[in-house]
Amino acid sequence: MKLWIVLCLALLGVELQNGDCQQVKRRKDVGENRIRPGGKRVKMRQPKLKDAVVKGQSLLTQVLDKGRFLRLGQTTTMTPGRNMELRCKGNSIGWSYPTYLDTFNDSRLSIKQSDKYSQLILTSPSAADTGPTLSIKHYDLFTYKDNLFVPSAIHFEIVYLRPDRPAVVPCRVTDPQAKVTLHREVPPEEITSNGTLLTYDPTKGFILQSPSLEHQGVFYCKAVARGTPQISTKYQLLYVEVPSGPPFVSLQAFPQSVRGGDSVNVTCTVLGEPEVDVSFSWSYPGQGRRPVHIQTSWRLVNRGMSHTTRVSQSIMTVEDMETIDFGNYVCKAKNQNGQTILSTNVISD
């Protein structure tokens, strides 16, 4: 079984044009030896190339062996079983890589910064390590014939569709030569990539430029390489039309009016974006002196025209009400965009 690792590189601050890296041929017919009137030959001076900057030169190199380096171009191939060591010139270099390497504190990855360069080492790379490596638009592609798609720990992923931004179905491939198509499960059909509204990027997946309600449903990707087809993880596409911002909160006590010895539930509810987490905190009359029970949960619901919304709730329960428990109950809901505070008054009947 043969594993080929392909490093796809986009260079820093330059764009490769057709022919830039080709050898320049001298053309004698341009007039290397011109004849002035009178029959005297004049030798034309050639431009000096000593100080010329080679367009397309990369700051990124691969360490092959001790004392041997390879300056990386657009693509580089290497055989499996070797550690990958990359160096990038500069004293302030940022690297990016698959997030699970951080999540699971993967010891295979190490990054060191010296005065002149930054060093990234990845031992025993696999197809799952496919992803961006440098903040200068460099992409590592680990090709494995048994996995045309980058492996995922999730067998059913959710993709949220918003009308104001592109959405990505992240079926990335490990073989840049693979032909990839997008398919809807029900009704079964292939979604044609037209190069404008729907495009495919091997490093990202299928990109929907203007998502709409009609794109909801269960989808999967199909890749074919060397005559062998493979199916990706399934993706549930959900349409979202909830504006970004601080939590939209409602607060309600039930019952609003109680007697001593009764129980009361105070419910703090937030409607928001499906993938935006909400945290709750409470202030209440008997805080620190009376026991309460707080239960927090969230779920996805369809509202209106099948718009998907996240409903987050925190419910405070006070049992066997005493005089000290009557008064204002304050809920503070917070997300990445801000916080909202509401209060409700529980009175004695």
Image (tube, grey):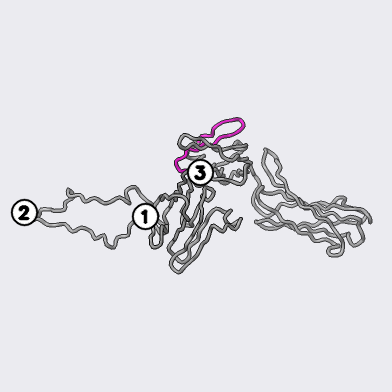
Coordinates of residue 22 in the picture (x, y in percent): 30, 50
Q: Secondary structure at mark 3?
A: loop
Q: Are marks 1 and 2 in contact (CB under 8 Å)?
A: no
Residue at the spot of label 2: 39
Displayed quadrant of residue 342: bottom right
Q: Nearer the viewer, mark 1 or mark 2?
A: 1
Q: Is residue 16 left or right of residue 349?
A: left
- The residue range painted magenta reads 174-192
Q: Is residue 339 left or right of residue 211?
A: right
Coordinates of residue 324 in the picture (x, y in percent): 90, 62
Residue at the spot of label 1: 56
Assess whether residue 99 is covered by the magenta stretch.
no
Numbered-mark total: 3
Residue plotted at (17% across, 50% down): 28
Vertical comparison of 93 with 275: above or below: below
Residue at the spot of label 3: 173
